[in-house]
Amino acid sequence: MNKYFPGISRIEYRPDAGPEDTLVYRHYNPHETVHGRTMEEWLKFSVCYFNTFRYCGSDDHYGERAHQRTWDDSSRSLDNYKRRMMAAFEFFYKLNIKYYSVSDRDMAPEGDSYDETNRYLDEMVTLACDLQRQTGMRPLYYSADLFSHPRYMNGAGANPDAHVFAYACAQVKRAMDAAKRLDAENFVFFNPRDGYQSVLQRQFFRDMSHMAQLYRMAVQYKDKIGFRGQLLIQPKPADPRRHQYEADAMATMYMLRHFNLDKQYKLYIKPAFSRLMGRTYEHDVYMAAAFNMLGCVDASDSFPEFSGTSDTCAQDIRDATFVMKCVLEQGGLQGLLPGRPRAPRVR
């Protein structure tokens, strides 16, 4: 694997590396034992496929794509998605880690019909399985993208249109099939459009009942196909919705408990989202852990001077230490440290 990143060898642990050696691990030794486990077992680092390979430096309505990559022509063709995937796996392999995180629409484009979309996904999953065998990689989590397509402008599981709800259920079904084929450790539900702009527009309990029904069917299908991964839900307070139903750990846990789903799901906490509600970075991590609902912690952060998500590396050693203290006390997590930092448009 040396086509897309020539001249770069696998990144290794080299604590004695000099300042001119940049492509090395100075502190992370995957085989070093800490509290009875290796670092590799404690720290399941994964590369976020979207932020690393699909994001190309656009800034919403402020600017078009800025990153130019030899393997990516910006088209939605299947050939372009295949080149991108091969470049991604070469990158994963050279990083010398074992996990990546991906959604169905990261892997394959939307087709002109439901059947064509599924054919695209099946073909890309087959390619991913082959690349996984070559590299020893697997998904730390897999998810269904239930927010990017215009059909989900008013939500997916909470969408008032029954046709959209049914499509979301069908998409989750196919995504879970893919997760099983890829041997994903977790399956994530992230629902940033399931919420409301105004209390005049929505019926809250009905919306959340519909979301719970989607979650219930996902549990049933997981058991039917024998998928062994853990089901996770990622809370977020807002953006793009003004208010999201699964706003934080407590709101999500209460909804799951009310609908008798708290034994089947755990939470995927992105600590930076706690800042959006004026809380400390580690707040939701500890809140989910207190109820034995912590399943995954994201490794990213946001800039502290504004209330928004920026997908940077963790910036404060205090924040990172508090989060890892909780993880150690819990004995580790099945999903830990998906990495979301991305190369920004500006440097």
Image (cartoon, helix red, strand yellow):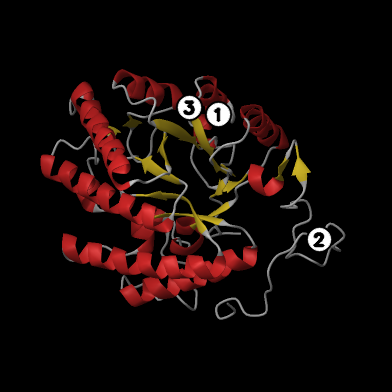
Q: Position of residue 173 (x, y in %)?
A: 26, 48
State the quadrant of the C terminus: bottom right
Q: Residue at x 16, y 44 (%)?
A: 166
Q: Which mark is residue 105?
A: none
Q: Residue at x 38, y 62 (%)?
A: 107
Front of the two marks 1 and 3: 3
Q: Earlier in the sequence, mark 1 or mark 3?
A: 1
Residue type marked 3: Met
Going by the image, does 341 lie left or right of 120?
Answer: right
Residue type marked 1: Val
Residue 254 in the image: above or below residue 214 = above
Q: Residue at x 34, y 46 (%)?
A: 226
Disc 2, SS: loop
Q: Which mark is residue 14?
A: 2
Q: Give the Cα separation between the discs numbered 1 and 2.
A: 32 Å
Disc 3, SS: loop
Q: Earlier in the sequence, mark 1 or mark 2?
A: 2
> Which residue in the protein does label 3 denote?
293
> Which residue in the protein does label 1 denote?
285
Disc 1, SS: helix
Mark 1 and 2 residues: CB-CB less than 8 Å, in contact? no
Residue 127 in the image: above or below residue 239 = below
Q: Position of residue 32 (x, y in %)?
A: 77, 48
State the quadrant of the N terminus: bottom right
Q: Earlier in the sequence, mark 3 or mark 2?
A: 2
Residue type marked 2: Arg
Q: Position of residue 239 (x, y in %)?
A: 38, 39
